Image: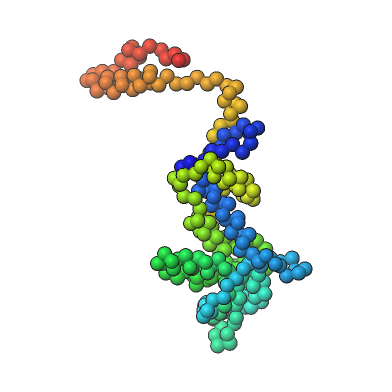
Amino acid sequence: MGQSSICPLSRDGNLLVLVDQHAAHERVRLEQLIIDSYEKQQPQGSGRKKLLSSTVSPPLEISVTEEQRRLLWCYQNNLEDLGLEITFPDTSESLVLVGKVPLCFVEREANEVRRGRSTVTKSIVEEFIREQVELLQTTGGIQGTLPLTVQKVLASQACHGAIKFNDGLSLEESCRLIEALSWCQLPFQCAHGRPSMLPLADIDHLEQEKQIKPNLAKLCKMAQAWRLFGKAEGCDTRQSLQASMPPCEPP
């Protein structure tokens, strides 16, 4: 159905809505990717959600300040819930070794390599560590929400795998997409925060009100007259139009 879809969700509905199919599928994919990023089996009685992680070999060497290193060491168990496994070598006080990272970072790396691009894992991990250190400095603890760095990586994955603009969808496919969107927690925006749908009209309101349509033929004649008389030397265009055109009447 091109880049947008219109599909009735309910026979009783009276609102005509234009849906951006790329943004809608991106949102559906993002929320599923978030669910899939957490371990299915949580430690009994812990009440904590843990991000899936993947081993990095050899471990990534990340440069840190003394204060950053101290904070990371104090909260290393909490950071493991976010998919980060950090060790602290005695040989250097300005270095940490990251042996595990969130699984989505490794998947992002594989996608970049497949496209012939340079490695990204280390830069993402550095950004992730900076983000967590800043949170620790300002709030004094690890937040329970999905980290922004992880969300950005998942949003990129959701975008690349989503239905593209101008991809043709059947009516059945469009309705399945909108049904999936209706189950999302944030159905009204894509993975990057842009609107996924736009209300066009209240059908009941349109049926109740008879709107006067513009007389397009008369408007075209007026435009032609403007171009014609506007070029005449010494011609007062406004007066000529008023004299030559009858008053505008409803069609």
Q: Is residue 153 visible?
A: yes
From what the image shows, is residue 205 above or below residue 2?
A: above
Residue positioned 54% across, 85% down in the render = 92
Residue 110 x, y percent position in the rendering: 48, 68
Residue positioned 45% across, 70% down in the render = 119
From what the image shows, is residue 86 above or below residue 112?
A: below
Residue 244 x, y percent position in the rendering: 32, 12
Which residue occupies the foreground of this view, 35 or 80? 35
Q: In the image, is 221 to the left or to the right of 153?
A: left
Colour pattern: rainbow
Residue 168 x, y percent position in the rendering: 46, 44
Residue at the left extreme? 233
From what the image shows, is residue 65 above or below residue 189?
A: below
Which residue occupies the foreground of this view, 82 or 56? 56
Which residue occupies the foreground of this view, 120 or 132? 120
Q: In the image, is 140 to the left or to the right of 131?
A: right
Residue positioned 46% across, 50% down in the render = 164
State which quadrant residue 84 falls in: bottom right
Residue 174 x, y percent position in the rendering: 54, 43
Residue positioned 58% across, 23% down in the render = 207
From what the image shows, is residue 183 above or below residue 147?
A: above
Q: Is residue 65 visible?
A: no
